[in-house]
Amino acid sequence: MPIITSPQDFNVEDLYVDLRPVLDVPLFLKCEGFNFAGSVKLKAAAAMVEAAERDGVLRPGSTIVESSSGNLGIALSIIAADRGYRFLCVTDPRCNPASMRVMRALGAEVLVIGHQDANGGYLASRIDHVRRLCADRSDHVWLNQYANRNNWLAHYNGTAPAIDRRFPDLEVLFVGAGTTGTLMGCARYFRERGRPVTIVAIDAVGSVTFGGIPERRMVPGLGTSARPALVDESYVDDIVHVAEPDTIRTVHRLSARGFLFGGSTGTVVSGAASWLAARHAADGRRPVAVAIAPDLGERYLDSIYDEGWLAEHFPDLPADHLPAPTTA
C-alpha cells in the first residue's frame, strides 16, 4: 500500500464489479468511490483547484465557493482543508444530511438555498447565489464545475484511459450525466482516438440536461434543472432517462447482494441494464460494456436506504422494494 501525505493522493482506479452474477446483466461497473472523498468528484475537484492555482486565481487566503449537491462539495472540502483554503458549499435541501455533516466536519461552510428556480429545481438559484457572493467579495473564487473545462479534462486524462487499458475491446460505455464532466471527458477521449465505443448518457427523469421536461427529483447527484455549459450532445450516441423509483429498486437489489452504492450509481446501473435488455435480450448478444459508478452508499443512509424517507417521498413504491422494518 502507498504512503501518502495528501488525501487526494489516494484513489483506487482499477476496481470493477462484474454484475453478471449479481443482476444478470452483462456489465462491468467501474467503482470510483474508493478515495477519501468517496466519489468520482475527487478527480474533477483536484484538476480544477490545481488549474486555478497555476493561473494565479487561487492564492493564499482565498475562499473557494462552489454549488454542489454533495459529492463535489465533499471533494473540495478535503482539498481545501489539505491546502489551507476556506471553502463555502452552496447546496439545497435535497443534499444528503450525511454529506453536509462530512463537509462541516472538514471545516467547510455549508449554505442551503431553499428557493426553487423556474424549472422547479434549485440549481439556477444556487448558481445565482454563488455569482452574487463572488461579485461582492474579491477573495471568493468560483471554480464553476458546470463550465470548467478542467472538469472534463480530469476524466479525459484519467478515467477514460484507465477504462481503455482494462478493456481494449470495449463496445459500450455508460456514464451518468450531472455536470457532464465525466461524460464529456470519456466521450471525447474515445472519439478522438477513433474507437468504435457507443457512448450512452444516463440521466434522471425530470432533468433538463438533454431537453427533458422538468419534474420533481429527490435523489441528489445526476440530473439538473439548468443545462450545464459543458454539454455537447454530438459526442453522445444515446440517452437513457431513469425514473427515481427505478434508481431505488436498483440500489436495493445491489445492497441485497452486499454492494452498498449511492443513488447516482443506482441510476447509472438501472439505465445501463434497461438499455442492454432493449437491444440484446432478443439476440442474446452480450457486448463488452462498462458503466461508471460515481459513488458509494453510506451518505444515502438517511434517504434512499431509510424506511421513513422512502415512505414519505415514494409512498407508491411496492413494499418489497423497501428496507426491512426494524423490530425491538
Image (cartoon, rainbow, N blue to C red):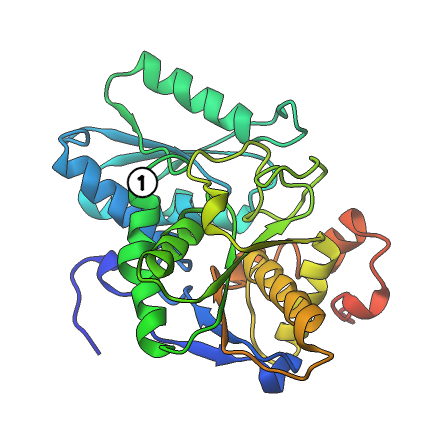
For the question of whether residue 147 can be seen, the reply is yes
Viewer-proximal residue among 183 and 50: 183
- In the rendered image, residue 167, in percent from the top left (x then y), is placed at 38, 77
Horizontally, residue 24 falls left or right of residue 170, namely right
* Tag 1 residue: 149
Residue at 42% x, 58% y is 39
Residue 101 lies, with reference to residue 146, above or below; the image says below
The residue shown at (67%, 84%) is 284
Above or below: residue 144 compared with residue 98: above
Name the foreground residue: 142 vs 112. Answer: 142
The quadrant where residue 189 appears = bottom left
Mark 1 residue type: Arg
The percent position of residue 300, horizontal first and vertical second, equals 58, 57
For the C terminus, the image quarter is bottom right
Secondary structure of the residue carrying numbered label 1 = helix
Name the residue nearer the viewer: 282 or 32. Answer: 282
Q: Can see residue 251?
A: no
Label 1: how many residues lie within 10 Å, few (<14), some (14-19) or many (20+)?
Answer: some
